[in-house]
Image: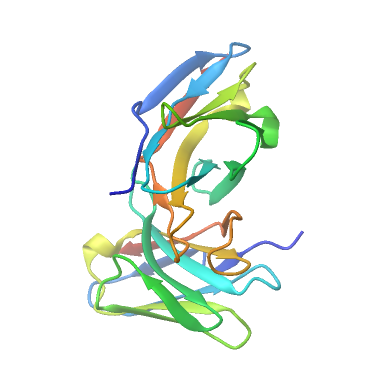
Amino acid sequence: AAGVIQSPRHLIKEKRETATLKCYPIPRHDTVYWYQQGPGQDPQFLISFYEKMQSDKGSIPDRFSAQQFSDYHSELNMSSLELGDSALYFCASSLGLGNTGELFFGEGSRLTVL
Amino acid sequence: AQSVAQPEDQVNVAEGNPLTVKCTYSVSGNPYLFWYVQYPNRGLQFLLKYITGDNLVKGSYGFEAEFNKSQTSFHLKKPSALVSDSALYFCAVRDAGDSNYQLIWGAGTKLIIKP
């Protein structure tokens, strides 16, 4: 079965650089969520989109932005990278906002900022 | 305020023994409860959920969880542990009345199954 696809899987950047992460949800899923997970920490919700509109905002820094495109894929743009941005970034998708179903997670994109 | 507590950072169990990973929650309304498992350097995988109905929920890989409303708990259980069950387990809750699908996550419990 098709799953959530994230790219790239690994990314190394230097401080003050920019990075873009991509997420392709499960086909027909219209809701995308972005999470950040630091070493040994639980996932921290960043932002979500439903039908290409931002639906909720969590602890996403102002240096970060995201959007969902017409094909429902989403991109997380991170600028002025800091060492503390090094983490595993997960994308998850679901069908419909506010449903009772579970989130389906991608394998994550590991960002290392040097 | 909504919250999830996983009181144990780590649980050690011998292979073949039953295992329990604890989770308690706090929401203002009715809870939707979830368990996810995370293997090293992998994404979170859904195990099971409680929305309504039977308090005992069965999920993937032989896991089950029991919803206890009076104790506000949703402990994860398995009758006989396998070494391959060793992973990080996250409990999550959502308030059924929440208009946004905002999951509240526990801190995670590392489960170590020893041969």
Farthest right residue in view: A1
Residue B102 in the figure: left or right of residue A74: left
Residue A114 showing in the rendered view: no
In the image, A26: left or right of B41? Answer: right
Q: Is residue B81 above or below residue A54?
A: above
Observer-nearest of B111 and A54: A54
The quadrant the N terminus of chain A occupies is bottom right
Q: Residue at x 23, y 61 (%)?
A: A84
Q: Check the picture and name the quadrant holding the C terminus of chain A.
A: bottom left
Query: Residue A66: x, y in percent?
Result: 41, 80
Q: Residue B71: name its quadrant.
A: top left
Judged left or right of residue A27, residue A105 is: left
Who's the residue at 62% across and 64% down the image? A4
Front-most of B47 and B85? B47
Count of marks placed on residues: 0
Q: In x, y percent, where is residue B7?
A: 33, 28
